[in-house]
Image (spheres, coloured by chain):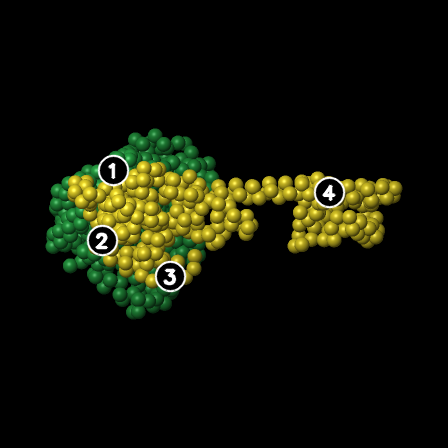
Chain colours: A green, B yellow
Amino acid sequence: MQVYLDNNATTMCDPQVVEAMLPFFSELYGNPNSLHKFGTASHPALKKAIDQVYSAINASDKDDIVFTSCATESNNWVLKSVWIDKILNGDKNHIVTTEVEHPSILSTCKFLEEQGVKVTYLPVNDQGVVQAHTVKSFITEKTALVSVMWASNETGMINPIDEIGEICKEKGVLFHSDAVQAVGKIPVDLQATHIDFISFSAHKFHGPKGVGALYIKDSQPLTPLLHGGEHMGGRRSGTLNVPYIVGIGKAMELATTNIEATMASIRAKRDRLEDALVELSDTFVVGDRENRTPNTILISIRGVEGEGMLWDLNNGQIGASTGSACASADLEANTVMLAIGADNELAHTGIRLSLSRFTTDEEVDYTIERFKSAVARLRAISSSFALQKPTVGGEVLECDLHH
Amino acid sequence: MAKADILGESLWDAYSNKVTTLMNNPQHQGELFQGEVEKRGNKLIVADFGAESCGDAVRLYWEIDPANDMIVNSKFKSFGCGTAIASSDVMTELCIGKTVQEAVKITNIDVELALRDTPDVPAVPPQKMHCSVMAYDVIKKAAGLYMGVDAESFETEIIVCECARVSLGTLREVIKLNDLKSVEQITDYTKAGGFCKSCIKPGGHEAREWYLVDILADTRKEMDEEKMKAAADASAAGGANFETMTLVQQIKAVDAVIDESVRQFLIMDGGNVEIIDIKSNDGYVDIYIRYLGACDGCASSATGTLYAIESTLKEKLSKNIRVLPI
């Protein structure tokens, strides 16, 4: 058996989505901007996809949802264009974000800092959540934008987006949310929540890689990131990626129809898995389950280094993820792990398991068994569980080696 | 970036088969206990290095025959990733059958070499080279405990890059001999900084006492000072070579020659000259001058006068001088 539990990284493209996309490669391949019938042949499918996307997040017809190549593009677009519109060509100079954002937000903010923008990186509490009052206290008259992720890719923890939205509305500050881990996983209703921009990406909810979107409330102005042939009302140029737009529409419809029931089903499996794993001694899971995306577990296992654990799970045909510094190319400890500040150990022993609607009960059972045997093997090797004490003078009193 | 970097290498695919095999099935994992070792009349040494909160930790066990200091048995325990476990296993293997004095000579380079499948292909990707360093550190610590000396005493020189074992002395020498100007050049010449990158600058995987950026800056400063000192000494000794003079010395020398042999003739004609700048240019020394008073715009200022100034300076200072009026 092989089990894929890395659905916060990417998901399997639903075969129904692939099926919906296929006609738009070699049959209906015209450019939708062309006047001839080859071009207009894809219009009904595109209109349907647009309807599916608007309806999935309850966007108003007055809003814009612009298709992009990925959420990284959407995030870059918002940050760089707010900088151009409100800072370079306006009287603002400040952006508020959090320490735990995705690199497409953090690296872009670092870039903007190099251009002279002031950026505040808000801390999170021990649950990994940004508190609304913290956001409120850092907004100034010079703040152009607040950007707070809807849910965390690492922990699954959900930020108080409704409250932050109300604060931004009251203060007259633009509000953006990277909703990559929220759309398709939890209900997102953009007529109930005040929010100016959200970014999302199809491959996180069983759509294809290479297509995402930016939601823009009330069709408000935002300088384009890509200039060109005036596609999508000039907001994002580039020939429409027809099969992938059809794909994101279908994937969003499938992910959000009966979302409560889907969530309950995934949550039941997730909770069963989590309950079984925390039976192991010296383990803990980050964040209150009730305020987490229903598919995510971030578990710390004392004495078991994350990359080693991932290795053993991989040998057992299970795909998971770790924030361990050892598993990254630059040996940098994961910023999210460090920001939660629970313990340095979490930065090295955290394993993330993320389920999907395709995860089965059999897979959960198999994972529990393999997970426990991997922990047993690695703890048998681990110095953290050794019995014989070091020779006097041979102990390590504290970590003076690494940061 | 180039073609090979577009996808990038998969971390685990870069591990040697030996690393993979030992991670899956370490041969010397386990413990030695005080009671049983003493029963055999031997001495147990147990040393720790690193800590769980650091991200990796190793505990090394040596059973030593006190009659000849021979390590007759060795085990390890490790909190670490696959390469840390495999490195610890090979380290333990390398210790067995050696005396403590011999074992302390085992370096992380030896451990990494022992993990290779073929002699010229590294056992681990560059950023994982550091895992074997812990093996070296814990051996020194165990030996220090047995011999009753500080682990630092086994180190005869300051090692700046532990992964490639490059010393401070070597780095300074290579920078000076090859006139190195960047950290990238240092890595090309010595491999230092090419692996875990901790020693390049503060803020890396591990805090270090010495960083390549500081060593480079200090050594460059030292080189500049040496150059200045040499120039001052040469000038004081009267044997100054114009090309190796500092800029200030060159200006003074040029001014002195002009004062002595040129300026009086220009003043007689109601003109003068001033030095604007001196630049080294591809083997030549270009002296930029500006004519003043009657010389400015005088027909011979671009021909005869210029030739006279240049040939005087060439004769008195250096044949590589070119004089350029601006």
In x, y percent, where is residue A106?
Answer: 37, 43
User: Which residue matches tag 4?
Assistant: B238
Where, by quadrant of the figure, is residue A229 drawn?
bottom left
In x, y percent, where is residue A380?
Answer: 18, 47
Question: Which type of secondary structure does the marked residue at label 4 adopt?
Answer: loop
Examine the rendering and report whether any part of residue A276 can be seen.
Answer: yes
Identify which amino acid the numbered label 2 is placed on. Pro
Disc number lying in front (4 or 1) = 1
Between discs 4 and 2, the one toward the N terminus: 2
Examine the rendering and report whether any part of residue A65 can be seen.
Answer: no
Residue B120, which numbered label?
Answer: 3
Between the C-alphas of marks 1 and 2, the distance is 24 Å
| Classed neighbour count for the residue bearing mark 1: other residues with Cα under 10 Å, few (<14), some (14–19), many (≥20) | some
Residue depicted at 60% across the width and 42% down the height: B226
Residue B26, which numbered label?
Answer: 2
Residue depicted at 78% across the width and 51% down the height: B315
Give the camera-side residue of A373 and A166.
A373
| Classed neighbour count for the residue bearing mark 3: other residues with Cα under 10 Å, few (<14), some (14–19), many (≥20) | few
User: Residue lying furthest bottom in this view?
Assistant: A27
In x, y percent, where is residue A101?
Answer: 32, 43
Q: Quadrant of the C terminus of chain A?
A: top left
Contact (CB < 8 A) between labels 3 and 4? no
Residue depicted at 28% across the width and 56% down the height: B19
Label count reads: 4
Q: Is residue A99 left or right of residue B258?
A: left
| Protein chain holding label 3 | B
Q: Are marks 3 and 4 on the same chain?
A: yes
Q: Quadrant of the N terminus of chain A?
A: bottom left
Between discs 3 and 4, the one toward the N terminus: 3
Disc number lying in front (1 or 3) = 1
